[in-house]
């Protein structure tokens, strides 16, 4: 059987015959499918991921309507391109629903997935969208949320550049970048093609080039290998710089910020799409700094949001838009190495916006948020400046 046939067999055995809707003839793969089919390694991940699917089935099996959008993501795990977002959603729904299986009374029913509201409900209207679509609604506590992948976009772009160069120069064995891993993704995104041309021109000018510092992005240096052997590159990391460069990414999702209801953005990190955010003290520093910048940094800033996104037709400032985000939840998935399949294997930190229009700090929802949080809980009540 192929890898995808094996995955289809797995989900059909848990959710019922006919659950798998993807083509098992495809040969493309991804990290999750590869790990599930590895005969020698990733035993912990196989057990943890299978246990997650069984929990989700247990939670949603009584309501086919609520289960249907969840099964869409179960199938997307098989996708070469969309598996990251699907994995993040399953990780989030597993953890956010965990109180149902532990006997707590904060959730009266499973969390509703894939919710659509009128465009006027959020900044979707100002951003030219036809509707407001969110990943979930927690009816028991009145919170809407959207789930996003917190991945290493910088490494993803660099890997694409490496691949293009290796195709252009077949004798190039390896190329690695030296940089601060908190470098701005937007700069790299804007200059991706110029950077590729710059590197290509450097190799043409000197076919045996060993090292090169970019003029397009001076923070980047590159090491080239033309023979087989061990290669190394120096990289540094600063969580505050990382947060400073990346926190504005959350404003990409302004069309999810509801105007009259509490809204959370849930950012899910996982080692197979983000190796920067390790489980250590720097992770907590990055997350808190990221959230605080979103909530508090623009307090005295009168810059129109349209300066950040020219498609925005509203008159609000960046700070004004940020006030419609009630909080950020960071979920760090640990299913790869954990030995506890009965756990959701998710570290959860909750950060609430002290300047939110729809504030959660003193709401009934805080009991639920405290319950799902097993790491850091901060409402910035004494750090709001």
Image (tube, helix red, strand yellow):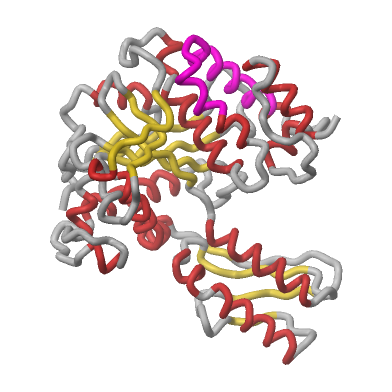
User: Which residue of the protein is positioned furthest toward the front in this rendering?
Assistant: 130
Image: 68 above or below 354: above
- Quick check: can you spot residue 206? yes
Image: 226 above or below 276: below
In this rendering, position of residue 282 left or right of residue 226:
left
Viewer-closest of 229 and 363: 363
Please state the horizontal and vertical placement of residue 381, each as a whole percent of the image.
17, 40
Please state the horizontal and vertical placement of residue 10, each as a whole percent of the image.
71, 22
- Please check the rendered image and state whether residue 301 is part of the magenta-colored stretch, yes or no: no
| Boundaries of the magenta span | 46-71
Please state the horizontal and vertical placement of residue 90, each as a whole percent of the image.
53, 30
The image quadrant that residue 306 belongs to is: bottom left
User: Which residue of the protein is positioned furthest toward the bottom in this rendering?
Assistant: 205
- Please check the rendered image and state whether residue 57 is part of the magenta-colored stretch, yes or no: yes
In this rendering, position of residue 97 left or right of residue 105:
right
Q: How many marks?
A: 0
The image quadrant that residue 170 belongs to is: bottom right
Q: Residue at the spot x=28%, y=37% of the render?
A: 263
- Quick check: can you spot residue 325? no
Image: 53 above or below 223: above
Q: Residue at the spot x=86%, y=68% of the render?
A: 228
Q: Residue at the spot x=37%, y=38% of the render?
A: 134
Q: Residue at the spot x=16%, y=64% of the render?
A: 301
Q: Main secondary structure of the magenta part?
A: helix
Viewer-closest of 85 and 99: 85
Viewer-closest of 197 and 155: 197
Viewer-closest of 101 and 261: 261
The image quadrant that residue 200 belongs to is: bottom right
The quarter of the image holding the N terminus is top right
Please state the horizontal and vertical placement of residue 195, each as a whole percent of the image.
58, 78
């Amino acid at each position: 059987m192929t890898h995808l046939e094996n995955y289809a067999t797995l989900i059909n055995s848990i959710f019922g015959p006919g659950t798998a809707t993807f083509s098992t003839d495809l040969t493309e793969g991804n990290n999750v499918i590869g790990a599930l089919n590895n005969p020698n390694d990733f035993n912990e991940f196989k057990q943890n991921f299978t246990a997650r699917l069984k929990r989700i089935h247990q939670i949603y099996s009584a309501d086919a309507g609520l289960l249907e959008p969840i099964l869409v993501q179960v199938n997307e795990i098989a996708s070469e391109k969309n598996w990251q977002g699907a994995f993040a959603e399953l990780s989030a729904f597993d953890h956010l629903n965990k109180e149902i299986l532990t006997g707590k009374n904060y959730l009266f029913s499973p969390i509703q997935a894939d919710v659509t509201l009128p465009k006027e409900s959020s900044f979707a209207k100002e951003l030219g969208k036809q509707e407001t679509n969110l990943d979930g609604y927690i009816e028991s506590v009145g919170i809407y949320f959207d789930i996003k992948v917190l991945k290493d976009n910088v490494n993803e772009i660099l890997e694409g550049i490496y691949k293009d160069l290796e195709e252009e120069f077949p004798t190039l064995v390896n190329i690695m970048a030296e940089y601060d891993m908190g470098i701005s993704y937007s700069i790299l995104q804007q200059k991706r093609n110029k950077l590729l041309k710059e590197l290509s021109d450097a190799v043409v000018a000197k076919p045996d080039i060993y090292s090169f510092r970019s003029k397009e992005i001076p923070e980047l240096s590159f090491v080239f290998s033309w023979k087989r052997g061990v290669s190394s590159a120096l990289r540094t990391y600063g969580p505050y710089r990382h947060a400073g460069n990346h926190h504005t990414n959350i404003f990409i999702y302004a069309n999810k910020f509801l105007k009259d209801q509490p809204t959370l953005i849930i950012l899910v990190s996982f080692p197979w799409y983000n190796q920067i955010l390790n489980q250590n003290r720097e992770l907590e520093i990055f997350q808190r700094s990221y959230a605080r910048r979103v909530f508090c940094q623009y307090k005295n800033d009168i810059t129109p949001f349209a300066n950040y996104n020219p498609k925005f037709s509203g008159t609000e400032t960046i700070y004004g838009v940020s006030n419609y985000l009630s909080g950020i939840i960071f979920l760090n998935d640990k299913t790869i190495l954990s030995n506890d399949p009965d756990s959701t294997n998710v570290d959860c930190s909750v950060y609430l916006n002290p300047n939110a229009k729809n504030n959660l700090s003193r709401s009934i929802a805080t009991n639920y948020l405290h319950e799902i949080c097993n790491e850091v809980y901060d409402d910035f009540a004494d750090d709001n400046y």
